[in-house]
Each structure stands twice: as C-alpha cells, then as structure tokens.
Amino acid sequence: MSTADFSTVETPIGPFTALVNAEGAVLAAGWTADAENLRQLIHPRLRPAELRERESLGSITTAVTDYHRGELSAIDTVPVSQHSGEFLLHAWEVLRKVPAGDPVTYTEFAAISGRPDATRAAANACARNAAALFVPCHRVLRIGGALGGFRWGLPVKRWLLDHEERAA
C-alpha cells in the first residue's frame, strides 16, 4: 500500500497543493486545498492508496513559494512522475521546456512535440496533465492568444501568464 505526502501553501491566487511520492517526485499539483481530488488525477498505476499531510514538502514547497514570488526558474528542476503513453509522456517533457513569458499555441505545441498535425492530441496532453505548474500547461494558448481551457480556471491561467510576462 503506497502513501503520498502532500502539503498546501497559500499563494496570491489561492491555495496550492502538491502530492509527492516516496522518492520526492510530484505526482499531482494544482491550485486547490483538496488533496483527494488531486489524488484522483494520478494515473492508476501511480496513484497512492493513502495521503499523509505534511507542513512542508521541503524543496518543493520552497519552489512553489519562490515561483509565485517571481523566481520563475524555481520550478524547472522539480522532479515529476506521471504515467501514460509515449506521446503524452514526451509532450509533458516538451511542456517543461516552454520558456516562462513565451507561451506557445496548441498548434505550435503539437509541432514541437513532433506531431504537427496532432493539435487535439497536444490539447489532450494539457488536459491530462496532473502536475500543474511543474509541467506548465498554462503556457499553451489558442491561436490568436485566447486562453483556451485550464483545470484550475481561466483567472488562474491569466494570472500565471501575466506573472511570467512581468517577471521574465
């Protein structure tokens, strides 16, 4: 029976919770205080049976706090563990390389993920990403700059994009 640790920290856009495995890799994260909801986003092969609340997750909590204060690169090296098919895993790796302050369109994201005709698959990679912030799906927009969707709400996505533009 596996257990994941979680911690919630206040940010300028509300509570942010991260769940980590025993190795310290982020399994799920988002702007919520509902750790159980985050647990359900984790692929069944990685989903922990139990959750254990911690006051802090050490360097991960520090990275979240630093990012929200303007140190955008603080999230870049936080380890993440997600499970899916080859394309989604690759797309999530690609998302981690999209620079803060320089968002891409879903079409551009599909192209840099190696499948230029797979815009819907690229959008699906964003929708199925459980490790928000650390896999920055908020950096993908519709053609023309429209926000598109975001699990944590469009006001959060707008704040993140504006924050990155100001701090970049």
Image (cartoon, rainbow, N blue to C red):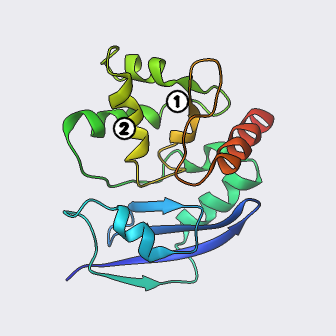
Residue 54 pos. (x, y %): 51, 83
- Quadrant hosting residue 27: bottom left
Q: Is residue 56 above or below residue 68?
A: below
Q: Which one is earlier in the sequence, the residue at label 2 or at label 1?
A: 1
Determine whether, in the image, residue 90 is placed left or right of residue 109. left
Read off the residue under disc 1.
98
Category of crowding for the residue at label 1, using alpha-carbon neighbours closer than 10 angstroms: few (below 14), some (14–19), many (at least 20):
some
Query: Residue at image x 35%, y 33%?
Result: 91
Query: Residue at image x 47%, y 45%?
Result: 135
Tag 1's secondary structure?
loop
Read off the residue under disc 2.
124
- Quadrant hosting residue 56: bottom right
Nearer to me, 38 or 25: 38
Residue 119 pos. (x, y %): 38, 23
Mark 2 belongs to which amino acid?
A: Asn
Residue 75 pos. (x, y %): 56, 49
Mark 1 belongs to which amino acid?
A: Val
Q: In this view, does 145 lie above or below 129?
A: above
Q: Are marks 2 and 1 in contact (CB under 8 Å)?
A: no
Query: Residue at image x 47%, y 38%?
Result: 96
Residue 20 in sight here: no
